[in-house]
Image (cartoon, rainbow, N blue to C red):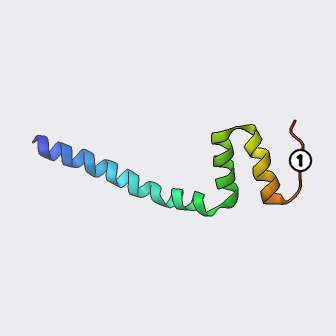
Amino acid sequence: MKNIKAFLIGLGFGIIAVGMLPFLFAASLNESTEAYHQAENAGKGEIIAAEITRTGYERKEQ
């Protein structure tokens, strides 16, 4: 009985992980999403850097 429970729990996590894959690939293909996630992790300075590289114009930090 323990083995069946463990198998079902593992299967559930596996289904969740496989279900998340398309979202991960979509985020890596989308430039703005990728820049947003990098900036979210690093802080405000990197948001401005990402906007400069993406749009091609400079913006002063507020």
Towards the viewer: 9 or 47: 47
Say what amino acid the circle numbered 1 marks: Arg
In the rendered image, residue 28, in percent from the top left (x then y), is placed at 58, 59
Question: 34 left or right of 5?
Answer: right
Relative to residue 23, is residue 44 depicted above or below?
Answer: above
Picture quarter containing residue 34?
bottom right
In the rendered image, residue 50, in percent from the top left (x then y), is placed at 75, 51
Residue furthest top in the image: 62
Residue under label 1: 59
Q: Which quarter of the figure is the N terminus placed in?
A: top left
- The residue at the point 26 percent across, 48 percent down is 10
Towards the viewer: 31 or 26: 31
In the rendered image, residue 3, in percent from the top left (x then y), is placed at 13, 45
Relative to residue 7, is residue 18 depicted above or below?
Answer: below
In the rendered image, residue 13, in percent from the top left (x then y), is placed at 33, 48
Residue furthest bottom in the image: 29
